[in-house]
Image: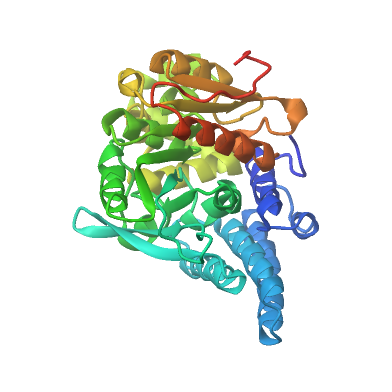
Amino acid sequence: MRVHFRSTAFDYQTLRAMAYTTFDGAEVGEVLATVDRIPDGDAESWYEEWSRTATLVERAADDALDVGRSRTAGHAFHRAHTYYRTAEFFLDPDDERRPPTYERSRETFRAGLNALDVPVERVTFPYEGTTLPGYLFVPSDGDGSATTPRPTVVCLGGFDSLAEELYFLCGVPEALARGFAVVLFEGPGQGAPLREDGLTARPDWEHVVGPVLDELERREEVDDERIALVGVSFGGYYAPRAAAFDGRVAACVAFDHMHDLWRASADDAPRLARAMLYAPDALVNRLAALGERTSVDAGWLMANSRWVFGIDTAAELQRTLREYSLTADARRIDCPTLVLAGEDDHFVPVGLADEFVELVGETAVRRVFRTEEGAAEHCQVGNLTLATDTIYDWLTETLAASRSSPGTVSDSTTGV
């Protein structure tokens, strides 16, 4: 689904920002007015123009708050959050503008929650001598309290998402309206743990999710027999990986699927990718450097990979990506699993979703979103209403049923 740019990375990030209109995290007019000022592929202009929009919208939020218009302020703060996050996106990891822009995205998000009086608690989870930050959202009971044990959705981000962004991408307002408690948190290679503590990604995410589940089991608001994981993008590897090794996960959603990271990355040119596995490191690195110089898409992907994975070269990246595969462990997943995929996903091919469902076995179902539905891009960012309704319909049915009887999804491409 092309929105504005020829550059795939610029255009997808535009669609990603626009998607959050669904949950009041953006406005179409503000997004289109911003990208209209940005030359295709100009990363510096991208930062400047999105920052300009974010600042204007944050100022409007402050003005509304000053005169007591809290809902107006809350909506504007949340739009400003999206625009600051988007502004930061293509900056180099060591760019001095990145920390303050990230901080503005985080603070405007929290200001929006406060202004809108959203029920939320900022939480931390112990992790290997430090802590991981998160948010706990619990719908109120009829008497105004929030102590009834709730089925709970734990949302995991991916390669570049922030916990704050997951509020919109995972449709937290919709989950709360349906009676779910929701946890958003960031692990190694993500958000604050990466930016502030230098924690890089790791493939064995059962050791990241496990401490989160330990803490949730102690919370009276959480029904510890009905905890589901929703993994977004690269989280479509993290969540199923955790489910494969931790029997406390009652249901798992791969939103979208990402069970074999190297094969997904090699899909555009599989023969060349296989050949590069046997090429000398120096050649792999030279070719990658050429791609970085000639393509903003390739440049961002390599820079973010160095940062997230804690590696230096393209040859190292090849070897690292191969560690992120569930091919050998998918059969260990014994909870109901929903695998989402899009026909036009430019990161991961639909065929890998079919393979993953087959590897997991009878507890897995899939939903393929079609071009005509406007939801066929990665993580269904063209139609988040359809995606989140699909997820929460399935979770409602699944968590009410036995672990061996997954809910169904409507999918005319599969007959499920």
* Left or right: 60, with 125 as reference point: right
Residue 348 sits in which quadrant? top right
Placement of 271 over or under 117, stated as above or below: above
Placement of 19 over or under 324, stated as above or below: below
Seen at 61% across and 40% down, the residue is 388
Q: Quadrant of the C terminus?
A: top right
Placement of 157 over or under 359, stated as above or below: below
Placement of 225 over or under 287, stated as above or below: below
Seen at 63% across and 13% down, the residue is 415
Image location (x, y in percent) of residue 10: 66, 46
Seen at 39% across and 21% down, the residue is 404
* Left or right: 159, with 49 as reference point: left
Asked whether 71 or 40 is in front, the reply is 71
* Left or right: 254, with 278 as reference point: right
* Left or right: 316, with 388 as reference point: left
Asked whether 360 or 374 is in front, the reply is 360
Image location (x, y in percent) of residue 108: 57, 70
The answer to whether residue 195 shows anywhere in this view is: yes
Image location (x, y in percent) of residue 344: 66, 27
- Name the residue at the front extreme: 143
Image location (x, y in percent) of residue 57: 70, 71
Q: Quadrant of the N terminus?
A: top right
The answer to whether residue 90 shows anywhere in this view is: no
